[in-house]
Amino acid sequence: MATLIFNIKQLVNVRSSWSLLHGDELAKLPCINNAYLILDGETIASYGKMEELKYDPSTFTDRFDTTGKLVMPSWCDSHTHLVFTGSRDEEFRDKINGLSYADIAAKGGGILNSAKKLAATSEDELFNQSYNRLKEVIGLGTGAIEIKSGYGLTVDSEMKMLRVIKRLKKASKIPIKATFLGAHAFPAEFKNDHDAYIDLIINKMLPQIAGEGLADYIDVFCENGFFSPAQMEQICLAGKGYGLKPKLHVNQLNSIGGIQKGIELSAVSLDHLEIMNDEDVQIVASAKTTVGTLLPTAAFFLRMNYQPARKLIDAGCAISLASDYNPGSSPSGNMNFVAALSCIQMRMLPEEAINAATINGAYAMELQDEVGSISIGKKANLIVTKEVPSLTFLPYSFGTNLIERVMLCGEWVS
Ligand code: NIG
Ligand code: FE
């Protein structure tokens, strides 16, 4: 059944072919003004300029007049921790009073705090809370998402998280990629025996997760006080043995060699990148297929320096933008705010922000042939904006909800 969207003020990110965008390619955002879009079932069937529309709009039973509005591909949020229990609002006060992310973690708060709560939550309850968050971000325009484990840190709880992600994949039309992040923190009982926890990840968690087909990727939090580059390598090589490619947390708090190691491991993406020295930037720039994923809302919430987006783009890196939705460093999965922050605080152009949060985000989940642009044959996962004066108005008017409706797989989401 065909649907027509017509009188589109601007159809955004229209591509007949696509590749991972590096450096100055990010500023080129192909658009069609005064356009139409035809959907056939779940997919995009055709598009063009209104004056080239061969059919009378009245012949379509499903037709939508979008005069004054933009139509864009949905956001592709390639880094989230959306499955968690409760919140960490109690730590918010500590943060306001001056404690750093590392201080809170050292006090037994942070990731271990979320892990304790998750252990005491049933799988059904965890699913319900997570499904509500997923529905929330879909309403905010997210149309493809990656979700990590990592608040389990025991065999049972990591499995519980990944089973919840599997249930989310079934319950929702949105494409979801699952990442195993057992190496998110060392549990208290392994404080003095890190090797034993790594052994548990490699020899107990990984075989079960792979046995049930619960993960698409493997992740490690490579940071002082967490996992070293050598430990990350050991865990990723074991994951690769089960077909799990790395998507990694590196350079959030320190530059300790995670970038170099991540490239050697052919990571699909290297994420965070707040703390980058010149050599780190050059290494990311020299990568052909690895995406550098920037998470500005984490820097915003932790009151840290933003990722050096301009330096990375000017050096020729392929970058994407993601929300990092999690209770500790980014309790928001709003990709509209992520795009706005990237423009306001990281000096990305609106075109760069939209490319980074759509097509390059799709590459960071290896979903580039399904989503991330307006292309024939891709899924009809779309954002229709309210009436706006321009595309620039979207990140400029940060905090205002400018989304009128969203579509997943050819169906409007209510
Ligand atoms: O990406 N830094 C590691 N992981 C998350 C935060 C996890 C947490 O604090 O709960 C992040 O920022
Ligand atoms: Fe994260």
Image (cartoon, helix red, strand yellow):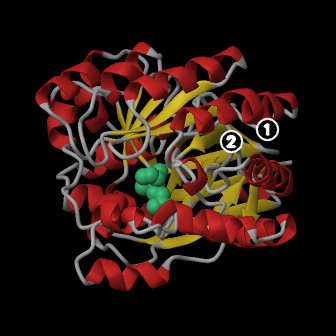
SS at circle 1? loop
Residue 54 shows in the view: no
Position of residue 64 in the picture relative to residue 140 (left or right): right
Asked where in the image residue 245 lies, by quadrant, the reply is top right
Residue drawn at point x = 83 percent, y = 60 percent: 61
Find disc 1 in the rendering and name its residue: 214
Whether ligand 2 has any atom under 8 Å from the Cβ at mark 1 is answered as no
Residue drawn at point x = 66 percent, y = 34 percent: 201
Position of residue 346 in the picture relative to residue 42 (left or right): left
Residue drawn at point x = 47 percent, y = 35 percent: 248
Q: Which residue occupies the foreground of this view, 185 or 172?
A: 185
Asked where in the image residue 227 lies, by quadrant, the reply is top left
First along the sequence among labels 1 and 2:
2
Q: Which residue occupies the foreground of this view, 267 or 66?
A: 267
> Residues under labels 1 and 2: Cα distance?
7 Å
The percent position of residue 259, horizontal first and vertical second, equals: 32, 27
Find disc 2 in the rendering and name its residue: 178
The percent position of residue 161, horizontal first and vertical second, equals: 74, 54
Residue 137, compared with residue 55, is above or below; it is below
Q: Which residue occupies the foreground of this view, 370 or 115?
A: 115
Residue 382, compared with residue 183, is above or below; it is below
Residue 254, compared with residue 287, is above or below; it is below
Q: Amino acid type of disc 1? A: Leu
| Quarter of the C terminus within the rendering | bottom right
SS at circle 2? strand
